Amino acid sequence: MTNFDAAVSAEDLTKRYGSGDAQVTALDAVTVAFGRGELTAIMGPSGSGKSTLMHCLAGLDTPTAGRVWLHGSRHGSADRVELSGLRDDALTALRRDRMGFVFQAFNLLPTLTAWENITLPLDLAGRRPDQAFADTVIDAVGLRDRLHHRPAQLSGGQQQRVACARALISRPDVVFADEPTGALDSRAGAEVLGFLRRSVDELAQTVVMVTHDPVAASYADRVLFLADGRIVDELREPSADRVLDRIRALESVARGARTTVGAGA
Amino acid sequence: MLRAMLRDLRAHLGRVAMTLAAIVLGVAFVVATWVVSDSAAATVSSGSSRTDLAAVVQSRPKTPADAEVAADVVGRLARLPGVTRAEGVRSGYAALVGTDGKIGTTSWAETAGTDWDGSQRFTLTAGRGPQRAGEVALEEQAAADAGLSVGDSARVLLGGDRSDTATVVGVFTYRATGWEFDPAVAYDDSTAALLLRSRDTGAGATPGYARVELSGSDEQAVVAAARAELGTDFRVDSGSELREKQAASAQSDADVIRKALLAFAAVALMAGVFVIANTFTMLVTQRTRQFALLRAVGARRAQVRRAVLTEAVVLGLVGSTAGVAMGVGLGLLAMRLLPVVGDVAYVVSPWAVLLGYAVGVVVTIVSAYGSARRAARVSPMAALRTDAAVPRRSLVLRSVLGLLAVAGGAAMVAVTSPEDLTEPKRMLAMAGAVLAWVGVLLTAPILVSAVLGPLTRLLRSPRPVTRIALRNAVRDPRRTAATSSALMIGLSLVCAFATVGQTLSDDLTAQVRSAVPADAVVLRAAAFGMLDDTVRATARAVPGMTGLAAPRSGSVEVVSPQGASQDAEFTSLDPAAVGTAIRPRVIEGDSDLRRGVLLAERVATELGVKVGERVRLRFMAAGAAGEPAPVEVPVTVVGVHEGSDLLRGQLIDDALLPAGVSREGDSMFALGADQAALRAALERAFASRPDVVVQDREQLLDDLLEPFQLVLGLVYVLLGAAVVIAVFGVVNTLALSVLERTRELGVFRALGASRALVRRTVRRESVVISLYGGVLGIGVGVLLGGVMQYVILANPVFGMSVPWLTAVVALAGMGLVGVLAAMWPARRAARADILAAIATE
């Protein structure tokens, strides 16, 4: 796991829900690392544990066992943090300053304008936005003329682009995107994916994206396949067709236990 | 359908509980008020009617000397057929001297002394009745105020400047007959005959009886026999007449209490209506999707509407039941805690219970009706959307009506003028003020947007906490308005009364401060008494005195040169003291009383008399035969002054006053080279006079202002109840808002807001809502108070004194209310589960 420059890594990450007979293992000793400056997609059928993995990586959920590291700006730097054992306030500060989030349901604060939503993480930290960088992000998402609109006045695609800009504004160590195109039509989805791709290429951003859409996954540098709480396969330089092929292969391995690719998180 | 609704209600027990709590509180206050007023009425009227009276005989006095019934009359009455007992009741001046060496104000001193007897007049609560000289029994309240109990030595000030020291052997409560003040002091009969006199008649006057009480089984026979025996010189009332009079006056006292209390209950209820209606609206809003789902699976609009109304009826009934129970409990508790001496009657009438139910159910249904209609209008399509909302009513009609009401109300006040404020005009102005007040309630939602909206833009730079809190507050102006309106109702009335009180007390303060020099020493008669000649003579003899004003007032008729006349008051005093020991506020001319009279402004205006003209002062003077006769004194008007409570009416020279004109004064103002030394000398001179108090100007002011403070304090307490209910409304609104925003709060947390920050945001929103209600309430209240004092005093509307202290305390209180109200909702918000919040379905 240390043979390449990772932004986030996890070791033996396990998450179980319930107890006794009703116990469900959502993550089963997952060890994984996400490369710095890469767009990594996590795929898997419904219930495979992909959302749980992301939530544990982001410190939104507490794993039953195992550890998660958020590596600093350089490999082996002093900024390296282990998430388990951090108290809520420390985790909160970590999410605010070093992580970005894009959700399926946009989740913008309805009372704030687009600009206020974008700068919210900085506001919360009591920092002023770096105007030049903010301009770069806003131009990249193409929202210059929509900055003073409220979310209700924006289309779904525009809202999701605001959410992307919000995720990037604090130059986080990693951006977690949870089904970012799930609620969008294909054109708006393509815009958002294109933007995430450019943030990796042009701003050297690290992005981890959970998706069930092979087309979305094809924007990634690397695709991880999850099934029953384990990483079962990996694909570099994916195309939509290769992703689809791989899914079919995995499904036949599972001997038709599941007939469709998961329809949700 | 109904089952689905009930299931849903059960699933949201928290919200249901809050709605219920709102109903319970509103109902409880109304019921408690009713119970208190019923009980107070019963307490006032119970225990005071005597059953041992067949008739009461009093003298019909032609001269003050005839006021008493002579002892031989009692003997004649006792021998009448059918009379089993004839008891003469003595009455005289008596005042208990308190620990400060001065007399208190608990009893009407002129008739506060009586003789002990075995009738139903007295009920002992401790000790026994007085039997010999040196023993005395005290009325319970008077004893408590003087700090005396059985075994103590009591000093009693008596008529004719005497006093007596006796051992307290008993404490009693008293049953009054007709309109009689409760006495404070009871001696045994022979001691009473020796000691009790009227204030001015000293020792030596023939002791008699104030009345004779007759007992007998045949009341009519006793009355007839007494009338036949005594003729027209005496008045004979039958026992049943007296009891009826007593009951009627108690009933009217009780009605006054009830009306006052119910006015406050109405205010509390209004606040309650806002809270209940608001809570219901939120309850429906939050279930939009569920209604849409019901509609989608085939529920008709009428069915949805009915379901919501049924829910309201059920909640109303349950809430009312709890509210009635709580109200009865609170009412009875209040009666226990009230400082009432003697037996307290506890009454829970069926009306109290019925009213509680009526209020609870009707208010809930009315509050729910609008919500029910809107719930029924939810489109079935809303079930499919995540951001479905109940269609909102337009605010246009409401706001237009509100603005019209405000404008109309202001116009109604404006058309009346203070110069000629007749009774109908006062009513019109007051009605205008109330109309404008209602108008503000109606316009409250657009005011929220109009006031807080710009504020959110002004505060562009602040931390996200403030910004988000403000935005959340403005988000649903109707909700914020309803919440803060509930606060505003109670608060505006508190501030209105505070404004009136402040204006009255400022007026009085200004009058006293301008009339009395700061370095004057004030001599006052204690316990509503008057100063006598001895006091004036003693004061004049005190060394170190450089000036003494001893104003005394009486009535006079002022006749203008044209012959027009006006009944008024006069105040006579030593011209040398005018301008030094006491200073009239001269408007025109000067205040040299040696040259003539200083007219009161009102009289001068009314009669059209100018300075320099001559008027005639017509006094009633007691002639040599004792029959009063008019005496006219022609005099020049040297000036016009603004009358005050200390210098009432026309000011004239003592020397100008014809002999035999009655006049009285309760205050004197002394000046000396050394104020402290003069005060000490006066205190020494009057150390043996418990009925004379030596004080300075500010103490005099405190005494004069005390009644205002007492009344205002009571008003604040009662209106405070409305504020308490409103505070609950703030909690309710916040809690439901927090529930509604679970997702948003989760996102907020996910993006890096700490729990403390979330708490702070909710708290700040709460403070914003509360302060908004506070500012609105205080502002509207002060203006309302302005109109009220205009109506009462005919001062200009904006001539009111703003009660800054009350305003600042109220505003600070509202801030605190905001913080406290947010405690629970904020904790709830901070606990929002991030994962649950951001999970997509």
Image (cartoon, helix red, strand yellow):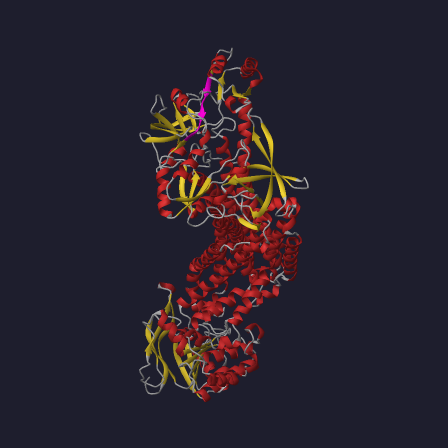
Residue B307 visible in the snapshot:
no
Q: Where is residue B605 in the image (x, y as percent from the top left)?
A: 63, 47
Q: In this view, does B306 lie above or below A56?
A: above
Residue B716 colored magenta?
A: no
Name the quadrant of the N terminus of chain A: bottom left
Q: Where is residue B167 in the image (x, y as percent from the top left)?
A: 32, 28
Q: Is residue B338 above or below residue B789?
A: above
* Direction front: furthest residue: B595
Q: In this view, does B411 lie above or below A27?
A: above
Prevailing SS of the magenta stretch: strand
Q: Nearer the viewer, residue A169 or A126?
A: A126
Q: Nearer the viewer, residue B197 or A228?
A: B197
Q: Where is residue B773 in the image (x, y as percent from the top left)?
A: 52, 58
The image quadrant of residue B393 is: bottom right
Q: Position of residue B96 (x, y in %)?
A: 39, 32
Q: Is residue B216 above or below residue B517?
A: above
Residues in magenta?
B86-94
Q: Nearer the viewer, residue B281 or A106?
A: B281
Residue B87 colored magenta?
A: yes
* Direction right: furthest residue: B562
Residue A247 visible in the snapshot:
yes
Disc tally is 0
Residue positioned 52% across, 85% down in the render:
A139
The image quadrant of residue B294 is: bottom right
Q: Which of B574 and A216 is in front in this view?
A: B574
* Image side of residue B178 versus residue A4, left or right: right
